[in-house]
Amino acid sequence: MIERPSEPFPTRPGCYIFRDAKGRPLYVGKAKNLRTRVASYFQERPGSKVERLKKAAASIDVIVTPSEWEAFLLENNLIKQFRPRFNTLLKDDKTYPYLKLTVKDRFPKALFTRRPIRDGALYFGPFVPGWQARKNLRVLQESFKIATCKDPLDGSRPRPCLRYEMGQCLAPCVKGKVDPRTYGQAVSAARLFLEGHTVALREELERKMREAASNREYESAAHYRDLLKATEALGAKQSVSRPGEGHWELFGLYGGGGEIRMHSFTLLEGRVVDRRAWRLEDVDGAEEEVLSSALMRLYGNSPGIPDGVCVPREFADAPLLARFLSERKGRRVPVVVPRRGPKAALVATLVENARIDFESRGDRSAAPRDLALLLGLAGAPARIECFDISHTQGGETVASCVVWEDGYLRKEDYRRFNVQGVRGVDDFASIAEVVARRYARLLREGAPLPDLVLVDGGLGQVNAARSALEPIVPECPALAGLAKREEWVFRPGTPEPLVLPKTSPALHLLQSLRDEAHRFALAGHRARRSRARLASPLLAIPGVGPVTARKLLKAFLTTEAVRAASEESLASAVGKAAAAHVLRWARGEVASEGRREE
């Protein structure tokens, strides 16, 4: 645990970095006055994140900057570079998906991404929750027929994929299927849709349809007609908009006790087109400081900068944030507190929504407290990792590890394992293998161990996990197992199970983790099994190996389509020699060799 530094820090602006014993950054912050800010961490705050930070830290470094503005920029860059685990505010950009439109390409495509970069493409988002991005991507496929695959759109593909046959793609990957002008029209319409300009989109499509018809360009007119019908079918109903108001983002927040909820509206031309919500847990400091840090994390990772930002109250870093956004956008971006009018009413609505969200959060600390008492732990577990095994008669075995920390599932820390050293049905050996692999790696990386390891199963699975942990972990975490049928809790070295009341918060927590681990393992097993089944008939063809099988599936999608393909299309996909082998197999002229492993 770090003690108060004996030498005083400078009184100038800059950044400070808490580091662990191996020198890895744990927390990055900025200050107008480094000495005052760092000293504030050594006031007594029992049970807070600051106390846990001091316990994990071994040293503090400071970087003096010429001004508070440079400290503001440096803090953002350091957090993005090091991703310290105690900087929890919106640091994980994987949580916020975007849609990417590669407008610099001759044939642009639409892609789902979680890592926006400055590459000349247009990014739309972030979308919270993530399913909104997937839904809009489907709209681009089904309504605008924009390519969404990762294949190069250079006309080199011999035949279009299934999406073209389903009317969900214009197939720019196949030479001659669509010209750049027609495809560009679809991309322009898709861009207007993603920007929320649905009224302008319909007006533009109607104008182009009439213009094409008057010029007797009937194919183009039909294309615009289809796009217009698709846009109308989306059911995007606009309220009264206020042209000229541009793109604004509004925020409201509410919280206390280390937890804050933040809600936002996105306005285009005065119309609300999107809403988002964030959960900011385990935070220290005033709401104004939290708001500043959260907005910097959000816009520091976002390629899209609004024309203005509305916040519920003044905060010290507002001029710095406005300067940062203005430099990113290339023109002035105000950060204001609206006092009257529609924006003020919307900000008040956001604050009220955040308050309702906060007050409905429930008591998340009851379950870990109960669990600590029932299992005899030294304290309430802050981090739990749960394992499950999924297989079909011992085949394609996949293990999962799901992570719960401070009341929430940390999906970015989830892991799957393909079980390698076990043959047949042996859940005990499978648990032992993946537990050993998981914690051997965490120890090599110097990552923190969980307070509790939970396995899906009874005493046998618990003992298997303990036998794997004890040789590699000096201080073995607490272990428990939850048996499915009776919902009994097993502990190592104790043959008698612990029977919890069905209303127990601790039991509900264990059940939710066990069920989540089961879901995650089952999804991985099904995917692995599907890949194996999809590939196995082709791998059984004499003269066809894994590489050729993948090429066939990429070109024809299914085994049945490969069987029905012509000699010419097979040769264009895999070459004449391999095509001859496939043709003989398709005609039943050769026997299968049985599946070969890669």
Image: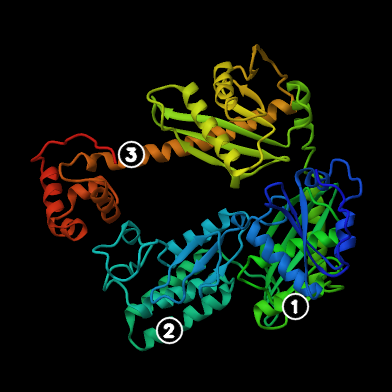
Q: Residue at x 62, y 34 (%)?
A: 385
Residue holding disc 3: 532
Residue 418 drawn above or below residue 86:
above
Query: Where is residue 87 shown, x and y percent of the image?
Result: 72, 54
In this figure, which residue is indicated by the disc labeled 1?
323
Residue at the extreme left: 589
Of residues 598 and 403, the one drawn nearer to the viewer in this rendering = 598
The mark closer to the camera, 1 or 3, is 1
Mark 3 closeness class: few <14, some 14–19, many ≥20 residues within 10 Å = some
Q: Which residue is mark 2?
A: 210
Q: Nearer the viewer, residue 268 or 484?
A: 484
User: Which secondary structure, mark 3?
Assistant: helix
What SS does tag 2 mark?
helix
Front residue of this view, candidates 100 and 475 = 475
Evaluate whether residue 71 shows in this view: yes
| Residue at point 56%, 22% (across, down) | 467
